Each structure stands twice: as C-alpha cells, then as structure tokens.
Amino acid sequence: MLSSNLKVAILSLFVAFMLTIMPLPGWVVEFRPDWVTLVLIYWAMALPARTGVTIGWLVGLMLDVSHGAILGQHALGLMLVIYIVHIQHQRLRVASLVQQAIVIFFLLLLKQLIVLWVSGIVGHAPDTWLYFMPTITGAMLWPWIYIIMRDIRRKFGYRANY
Amino acid sequence: MQTLFLRGPSATLRMIIFVIISLALMTVDHRWKHLDAVRNTLSYLLYPVEYVVDLPIRLYYWGEETLSTQQNLLDENRRLRDLQLQSRVQLQKLDILEKENERLRELLSATPKTTEDHLIAEIIAVDVDPYRHFIVLNKGTNDGTYKGQPIIDAHGVMGQIVYVNAMTSTAMLITDVSHAIPVQIDRTGLRSVAFGTGQTDYLDLRHIPHNADLRVGDKLISSGLGERFPRNYPVAVITKIDRDTGETFIDVRAEPLAQLDTSREVLLVWTQNHEKAMPEPEQPAETPEEETVEKPAEEPDKEVVEEPVDAVE
C-alpha cells in the first residue's frame, strides 16, 4: 500500500522526532537543531506533490504535543515554512547547497520568530539570545542533511515520483 | 500528480485556512483548555518515539540490575534493611504523633486531616523543551493520574501534572516560569507564593514586605492553600535575602529541596479532593469539585483564610 518513498519519509520523521526529544548534556541542549522542520523541508522540496501545507500543519501539531506547547504554535510556524518551500521548490532545487542553506536559515528564523511570538503572548518567552542558536546550527547542518536524505531516498525510495 | 506546475492557488488558500485554524486553536487551547482530547490522541502517535528514546536508558538500568554480583546485591540488601529499620522506628513516633494530632484536631473541631495516596512513577528520559521545565512520567490515566496532580520526591515537592495521556503524563516543575506554589515559612508560619524563575536552582518569593521575619536557611513548606498541593511538604530553603531599602519589597530567593534534575523516580500524590482510581468515598459531602485556577491561590497575602498553623508543633 504505502509507497517506498512514503515509508522512508515516515521513518525519517520518526528519527527526527527521536532526535528532538533525545536527552542531551546540558551545554548542547540549546544548540539542538530543529530536526523535524529540516527533514520536512527536505521532503517538501523532494516530493512537493505529497508534502504540502496540510502535512506541514499536522506534523507541527505533533511537535506542539511533544513540546508541551500550546496547540497550534509550532503548527503555524511549520506550516508557513512548508508553504514557502512548497511554492518555491523548483527554485530551491536548482540552487547550490550554500544558497539553500542561506534560504533555510531564514525559513528556520521565521519559524523560531513565530514560536517566540506566541510564547511571548502567552507569557513565557525565553529571555536569552541562545534561543536563536538552533536556527544557525540548523542552517549549518543543512548541506549534510540534504545529501544524507537524498542518498537515503535514492537508495530506498524509487526515483521520479514527481 | 504529474503536473509540472503545482496547484498554486489551492496551496495558498489552504495556507490561509490553516493560519486561521491555528490562531483559533491557540486561542481555544490557551483560554479554555478544552483540547485535551486532541492532545491525547496525538500523544498516542508520539508514544512509540518516547518509548524508543527511553529504551537505551531502561536497558542500562536493567543491565545494571541483572549483571550485578551477588555480593553487591547482598550489601545493598543489608543496607536497605538497616535503613528500613531506622525509618520504621521514626514512623512509629510519627504514627503516635499523627493520632495525637487527629485527636487534638477533633477537639478543635477542625477539618480532619486525611491521609494521601501515593504511587511511584518513573521519569521517561526525554527532553521536552530547553526553555520549559517539563518532565514526562510513565504513568497516565490508566493509573488514575489527573491534571493538576502534585508530584514529589524523597526531598520535597517537585511540581504538578499538566497534561495527562493514557500511558504517560507531562509534569511541570516548580521552577518553570509559569508555575507558582503557595508556601509557608516553617518557622514562623508566614504565607507566601514561590514563583518559578526558569532557572533550576532557585524560586522567587514575591511581595514580601521589609519587616517580614525571614532568615537565610528558613524552610518553606507547602501551605495547601489553593487546594492543589498537599500541606506540609518541604518545598525549598531560603538561600538569599536582599533587603534593598529603595525597593518596596525585599528580594528573596529559595533553592528547591527536591532533586529536580537528578531523580529518576517520583511520587504521585492523590490529595483528599481526588480519590485514587477505586474511590472509597469518605466524606463525599465536602469534596469541592474541579477548581479552575491555573496558578493555585493568586494572592494569598490578601485573602484571610483562617487556618490553624499546625495544631501540634
């Protein structure tokens, strides 16, 4: 039933969620990149017909539950990011990895800002600049994530699904 | 599916719809907190992830138990037996005191102090959010836990449960920025509220006047006002008092006694308002149902609650 691409996508999201909640030593916790967003951005670029706004929103809702955040907080941010990737995927695909990483930086920043904005309204915004570290680490890791995900997809999923 | 240009307007339309849904969802969740069912359903999907992440640590503990030598086990057994003997001796005294306390309370015709039920829960080793102080426990509604349930460890109050799912529950620690616990100074009986600061090592006592009788080293115990936390559990010890005469209130910091970031096992407490899974109604007449306050007892300094400061000292 499930196409092999879909299986790989679900598995990669599972791993991304694992990395998101995995306990880390205290000093790296603030540098933990937003794995789920990065992986989902990849799938929105690779399989835009399957990974749309709806999937982005639903995965964001899962992120809310796992973070114990207000329902809709991460969902809104992730959905907007996926929307931008979705409508720009053809341009993003032909960009070089460095250019992609720069775009990813701003996309992650957008999500962080939306999440921060909601936290601020609710009244528990973090008051440290370290809050924006995941944006930087995420953008720096992007080339590797892209290459790894692409190789995995080429190996296990079948190509030319779009 | 094979179109070269994806349906642009439809994606934009969906985006706008989802923005509206998100805003509505956040408002509903924040204002009325009626979305627990949605949260529960989604947490079923997340449970396998949590299970897998916790697995190595569980295996480590399992391995430690299975592979330890007989000598180690015997030593530990002996040590624990000694400890139990000591605790039992202390408990005997406590038992007598409790009886005496009850009698005196009856004489004063004060409300009877009911005993609480306990259940041990294990912390699942997952990191929730670096800027919130949440922990995930391996007990859920299947074990009768409820929203707002206090959790304690061997040293003091740890926090309260904020989200309950079937198999797990999420608890907020007393140091979280949005947490506050009504407390009382052990020595003088002065009531206050200890606010979480977002730092793991101290709580804030706000609105304490300059003439308050406070000393560094004073113990804070839960006062039971707000009817969420049980009374007389240790919460924190005052570590710093800053009496700046230019300020209206003094700046008091207290260090939590519970080992918030090291304990692996915690105790769930059923207070008198909430009976454990199999309810034996003892005083059904005076159980107030469902309080809706998020932070227990907003300003206890102002409300004059007549409450005997411990019948037996």
Image: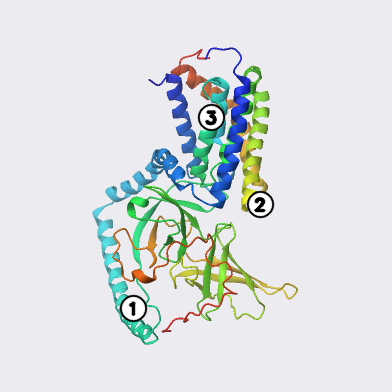
Does the rendering let one see residue A28? no
Q: Residue at x 48, y 37 (%)?
A: A17
B290 to B56, vertically: above or below? below
Instruction: Report the disc number at residue B154.
Output: none
Dot 3: within a 10 Å radius of its alpha carbon, few (fewer than 14), some, or many (20 or more) residues?
Answer: some
Query: Secondary structure beneath disc 1?
Result: helix
Q: Look at discs 1 and 3 and give the one toward the viewer.
A: 3
Spatial separation of the CA atoms under disc 2 and disc 3: 32 Å
Spatial separation of the CA atoms under disc 1 and disc 2: 46 Å
- In the orientation shown, which residue stands out farthest toward the bottom? B107
| Quadrant housing residue B89 | bottom left
Q: Position of residue A134 (x, y in %)?
A: 61, 39
**Residue that mark 3 sits on:** A54
Query: Disc 3: which chain?
Result: A
Left or right of residue B156: residue B139: left
- Which of the marked residues, 2 or 3, is nearer the chain's N terminus? 3
Query: Secondary structure beneath disc 2?
Result: loop
The residue type indicated by label 3 comes to Thr
Q: Position of residue B67 (x, y in %)?
A: 28, 48
The residue type indicated by label 2 comes to Asp
Q: Are marks 2 and 3 on the same chain?
A: yes
**Residue that mark 2 sits on:** A127
Of B98 and B270, which appears nearest the observer?
Answer: B270
Dot 2: within a 10 Å radius of its alpha carbon, few (fewer than 14), some, or many (20 or more) residues?
Answer: few
Instruction: Report the disc number at residue B94.
Output: 1
